[in-house]
Image (cartoon, rainbow, N blue to C red):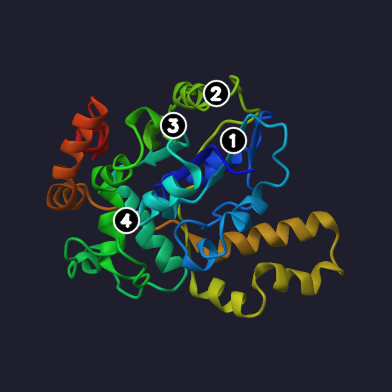
């Protein structure tokens, strides 16, 4: 069985939270592993649809069958591959976030994993040149990786060459997971998927990106927090072990500082406003939630 729903992006726009939420729906089957990477990675795609189908071996009897791989939205060759394997009837889901916030979150994610060495986000964008990072993966710290993945209308246009507009659902991150967000968008998504209305037992919130400290990287070299606490777990009660684990987690991570309002405005105008205007026309809705006063 092949999926009839694919969440294709964007990265750092709540796709993990959405995956966890949809996975609790009794009428929806998702591939057990988030990010199957069939259509974007040649090594997987070259194994054929049979390899892909293995990820949905438990989907018999489910009306909605899907997977979540946010990298799909990025690469120009993915839409054609998806059309060839899944056909025009597959439903696509895109989650879009304030483009500056998404790009900055990705920058901090790369800092967390040690692949981004530049000190500031602004410095990382200084060498950006339009049109990169869409043909093939280059390297993690390519500035195009941050900018191009936030130019959503450009990415959507590639999919519209193969799939009709009515097969694409666009959700706005801030309306789904931001402060005071309701469940309206999530319920509209379920209706789009053809799934029954569903209210999760817990509120849905996307986690903020946190950055590893030097201590965290040192611990990772010795097996991570699990490895370190595992050395002493046998000598601790479950209660004290949990306290130690929480203390270590708190010591090793911190939330990165936010961008100054004037920096947000400058980056928005320089890299994204032209794309947002086109996106507003295509969606037939206002997106000032990203660039208006409330977003600063």
Which residue is at 62% across, 28% downward? 200
Residue identifier under label 4: 76
Which percent across, then down, holds residue 160? 30, 40
Q: Find numbered disc 3 in the image and state the secondary structure of the residue it sits on.
A: helix
Q: Compared with residue 277, is residue 147 higher up or lower down, i.e. above or below?
A: below
Which percent across, then down, holds residue 39? 47, 56
Q: Earlier in the sequence, mark 1 or mark 3?
A: 1
Count of all numbered marks drawn on residues in the image: 4
Q: Please tell me whether mark 1 or mark 3 is closer to you in this view.
A: 1
- Please rate how many residues cluster around mark 2, counting C-alpha atoms within 10 Å: few if below 14, some from 14 to 19, many from 20: few
Which residue is at 26% across, 66% downward? 143
Asked if residue 100 can be seen in this view, the reply is no
Q: Find numbered disc 1 in the image and state the secondary structure of the residue it sits on.
A: helix
- Please rate how many residues cluster around mark 1, counting C-alpha atoms within 10 Å: few if below 14, some from 14 to 19, many from 20: some
Which percent across, then down, holds residue 90? 48, 37
Task: Report whether 220 appears left or right of 132.
Answer: right
Which percent across, then down, holds residue 171? 39, 33
Residue identifier under label 2: 194
Q: Earlier in the sequence, mark 1 or mark 2?
A: 1
- Please rate how many residues cluster around mark 3, counting C-alpha atoms within 10 Å: few if below 14, some from 14 to 19, many from 20: many
Specify the quadrant of the image occupied by residue 121: bottom left
Q: Earlier in the sequence, mark 3 or mark 2?
A: 3
Q: Earlier in the sequence, mark 4 or mark 2?
A: 4
Q: Quadrant of the N terminus?
A: top right
Q: Please tell me whether mark 1 or mark 4 is closer to you in this view.
A: 4
Q: Earlier in the sequence, mark 4 or mark 3?
A: 4
Residue identifier under label 3: 176
**Disc number at residue 22?**
1
């Amino acid at each position: 069985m092949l999926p009839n729903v694919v969440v294709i992006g964007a990265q750092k726009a709540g796709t993990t939270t959405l995956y966890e939420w949809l996975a609790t729906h009794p009428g929806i089957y998702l591939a057990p592993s988030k990010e199957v990477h069939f259509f974007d990675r040649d090594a997987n795609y070259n194994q054929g649809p049979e390899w892909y189908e293995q990820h949905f071996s438990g989907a018999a009897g489910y009306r909605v069958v899907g997977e979540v791989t946010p990298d799909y939205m990025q690469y120009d060759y993915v839409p054609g591959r998806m059309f060839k394997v899944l056909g025009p009837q597959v439903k696509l889901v895109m989650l879009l976030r304030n483009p500056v916030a998404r790009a900055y979150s990705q920058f901090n994610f790369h800092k967390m994993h040690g692949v981004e060495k530049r000190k500031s986000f602004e410095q990382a964008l200084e060498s950006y040149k339009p049109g990169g990072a869409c043909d093939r993966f280059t390297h993690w710290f390519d500035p195009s990786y941050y900018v191009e993945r936030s130019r959503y209308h450009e990415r959507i246009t590639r999919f519209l060459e193969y799939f009709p507009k009515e097969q694409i659902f666009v959700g706005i991150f801030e309306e789904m997971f931001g402060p005071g967000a309701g469940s309206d968008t999530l319920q509209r998504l379920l209706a789009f998927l053809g799934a029954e209305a569903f209210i999760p037992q817990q509120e849905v919130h996307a986690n903020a990106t946190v950055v590893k400290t030097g201590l965290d990287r040192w611990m990772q070299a010795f097996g991570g927090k699990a490895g370190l606490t595992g050395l002493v777990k046998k000598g601790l009660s479950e209660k004290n072990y949990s306290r130690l684990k929480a203390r270590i987690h708190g010591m090793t991570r911190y939330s990165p500082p936010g961008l100054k309002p004037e920096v947000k405005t400058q980056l928005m105008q320089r890299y994204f406003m032209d794309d947002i205007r086109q996106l507003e026309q295509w969606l037939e809705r206002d997106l000032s939630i990203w660039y208006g006063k409330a977003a600063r």
